[in-house]
């Protein structure tokens, strides 16, 4: 099975949720909910898309760990190992 | 051969996006057939053809946005076929100016010139035929460029009255772009929101009630339920609150329905309108039909679909006129209390504040609990505070037993 690039997937899915934002310019340590104006439905869609594409199931209790771009990428890399 | 063209649905419409073809080359069409679905600022509109004939050629691909008047397909009419003149079809007359409404409309509208080509009529789903219009409605429609034939009248005998035109201005608030950029259509949406809200504040004597209660049971139930599920099957708290409102209002029907022509018309079913914030600003509040009959999972699926479509600008026009009561939820980022402004002709709107952790007394003990503040804005022409208080208490009661929702 191919090994999709986690960072690319995360950025692409965030881009789908916030199409008007330039994900490349988002501060990697900023709260994504503030930086991209993401609500709980958006976040659920993001988590759903990540699960679908990377096969990584993110339990609700881990949501706070994915609140920044850096945090999300780090969390997913650890989970995939 | 005649051209089937992108119709104009009002003076403010400059272009439409072709989202569905219901015919293909070689298909027979007859007058009144719906041949395409076009997405406009007013939502997706089914477009009928007004000729008998055979589709010769499709000229515009799906998802393409084209100006009003652009030929979408070529149709060989029966008359031409008989005369054997199809190939030598006469050149087409000029396109009617974009502002000219389709032929079915009222006498005051600019009459289509006798040479108007490929006469097409446009009707939103379920509202065919000639429309009668009140003078006030016509005046507003003219000043705002609203196409009256696309409006479903709620007056006597289906007459289009002022309320209907104002409602349609709210519906104009739908963005057309799939990928919206900040700033797009915001001015038009603001005008629509302003029209509806100004009317609400002018005509509806609002009263407001506030009720605060613990969401401990609901949060625990939700966490337990979602822990067993993959993300695609998870629920959000808003599904629970919307369901609780729908069930509660069934017991208090005085908050469910419309105030029209000086009296309250209770609605037979509960279609909760859900306020959805759009990226970049603005909001819409389309309906979830028959909310009381949906299991939580189904309701959640519908809400996900609705939010996605709202943000992509693909709300159906009926979803704007259907809500019998509206719920506006703050979500997890926001403020604790929100006082809604009623969407006319509805008679109530609930504001669900952000759930916050607060010291709360349960059985004589202070402990931190998740607490929500729910407000009811209701129409004093229809109900009063006593009923409103009972309605809010019922929502509270239902949310204490989430497994029964």
Image (cartoon, coloured by chain):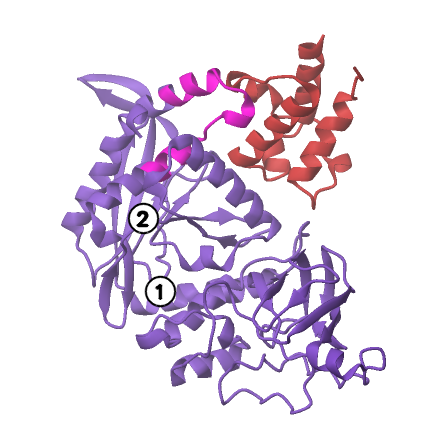
Chain colours: A red, B purple
In this picture, is B315 found above or below A54? below
Direction left: furthest residue: B386
Q: Indicate which label's residue lies in the foreground, 1 or 2.
A: 2
* Secondary structure character of the magenta stretch overall: helix
Q: Quadrant of the N terminus of chain A?
A: top right
Question: Furthest-top residue in view?
Answer: A81
For residue B58, above or below residue A33: below
User: Which residue occupies the foreground of this view, B232 or B327?
Assistant: B232
Which chain is disc 1 placed on?
B
User: On residue B282, which mark appears?
Assistant: none
Q: Which mark is residue B200?
A: 1
- Looking at the rendering, the stretch of residues picked out in magenta corresponds to B221-243
Give the residue pinned by disc 2.
Answer: B270
- In this picture, residue A59 sits left or right of residue B296: right
Q: Residue visible at 49% across and 53% down?
A: B284
Q: Residue sitting at 56 percent across and 58 percent down?
A: B174
Does the magenta segment cover residue B227? yes
Q: Is residue B391 visible?
A: yes
Q: Quadrant of the C terminus of chain A?
A: top right
Tag 2 or tag 1, which sits nearer the N-term? Answer: 1
The residue carrying pointer 1 sits among few (fewer than 14), some (14 to 19) or many (20 or more) residues within 10 Å by Cα, namely: many
Task: Give left or right: position of B233 versus B371.
Answer: right
């Amino acid at each position: 099975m191919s090994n999709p690039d986690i960072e690319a997937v995360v950025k692409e899915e965030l881009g789908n949720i916030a199409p008007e934002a330039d994900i490349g310019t988002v501060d990697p340590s900023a709260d994504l909910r503030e930086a991209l104006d993401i609500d709980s439905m958006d976040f659920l869609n993001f988590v759903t898309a990540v699960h679908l594409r990377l096969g990584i199931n993110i339990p609700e209790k881990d949501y706070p760990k994915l609140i920044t771009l850096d945090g999300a990428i780090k969390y997913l890399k650890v989970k995939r190992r | 051969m005649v051209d089937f063209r992108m119709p104009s649905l009002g003076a403010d419409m400059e272009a439409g996006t072709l989202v569905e073809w219901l015919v293909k080359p070689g298909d027979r069409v007859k007058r009144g057939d719906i041949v395409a679905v076009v997405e406009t600022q007013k939502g997706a509109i089914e477009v009928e053809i007004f000729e008998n004939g055979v589709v010769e050629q499709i000229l515009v691909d799906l998802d393409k946005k084209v100006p009003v008047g652009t030929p979408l397909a070529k149709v060989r009419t029966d008359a031409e076929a008989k005369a054997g003149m199809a190939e030598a079809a006469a050149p087409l007359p000029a396109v009617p100016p974009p502002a000219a409404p389709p032929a079915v409309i009222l006498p005051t509208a600019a009459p289509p010139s006798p040479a108007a080509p490929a006469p097409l009529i446009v009707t939103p789903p379920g509202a065919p035929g000639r429309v009668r219009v009140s003078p006030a409605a016509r005046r507003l429609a003219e000043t705002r460029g609203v196409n009256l034939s696309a409006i479903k009248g709620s007056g006597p005998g289906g007459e289009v009255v002022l309320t209907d035109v104002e409602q349609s201005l709210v519906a104009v608030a739908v963005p057309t772009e799939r990928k919206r950029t900040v700033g797009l259509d915001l001015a038009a949406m603001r005008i629509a929101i302003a029209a509806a809200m100004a009317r609400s504040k002018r005509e509806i004597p609002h009263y407001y009630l506030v009720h605060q209660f613990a969401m401990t049971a609901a949060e625990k139930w939700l966490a337990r339920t979602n822990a067993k599920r993959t993300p695609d099957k998870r629920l959000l708290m808003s599904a629970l609150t919307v369901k609780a409102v729908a069930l509660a209002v069934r017991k208090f029907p005085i908050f469910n329905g419309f105030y029209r022509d000086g009296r309250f018309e209770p609605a037979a079913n509960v279609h909760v309108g859900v306020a959805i914030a759009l990226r970049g600003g603005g909001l819409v509040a389309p309906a979830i039909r028959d909310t009381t009959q949906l299991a939580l999972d189904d309701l959640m699926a519908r809400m996900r679909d609705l939010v996605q479509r709202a943000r992509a600008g693909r709300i159906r026009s009926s979803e704007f006129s259907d809500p019998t009561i509206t719920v506006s939820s703050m979500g997890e980022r926001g403020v604790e209390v929100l006082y809604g402004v009623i969407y006319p002709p509805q008679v109530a709107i609930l504001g669900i504040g952000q759930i916050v952790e607060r010291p709360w007394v349960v059985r004589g003990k202070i402990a931190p609990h998740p607490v929500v503040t729910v407000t009811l804005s209701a129409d004093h022409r229809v109900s009063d505070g006593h009923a409103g208080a009972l309605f809010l208490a019922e929502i509270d009661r239902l949310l204490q037993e989430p497994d029964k929702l």
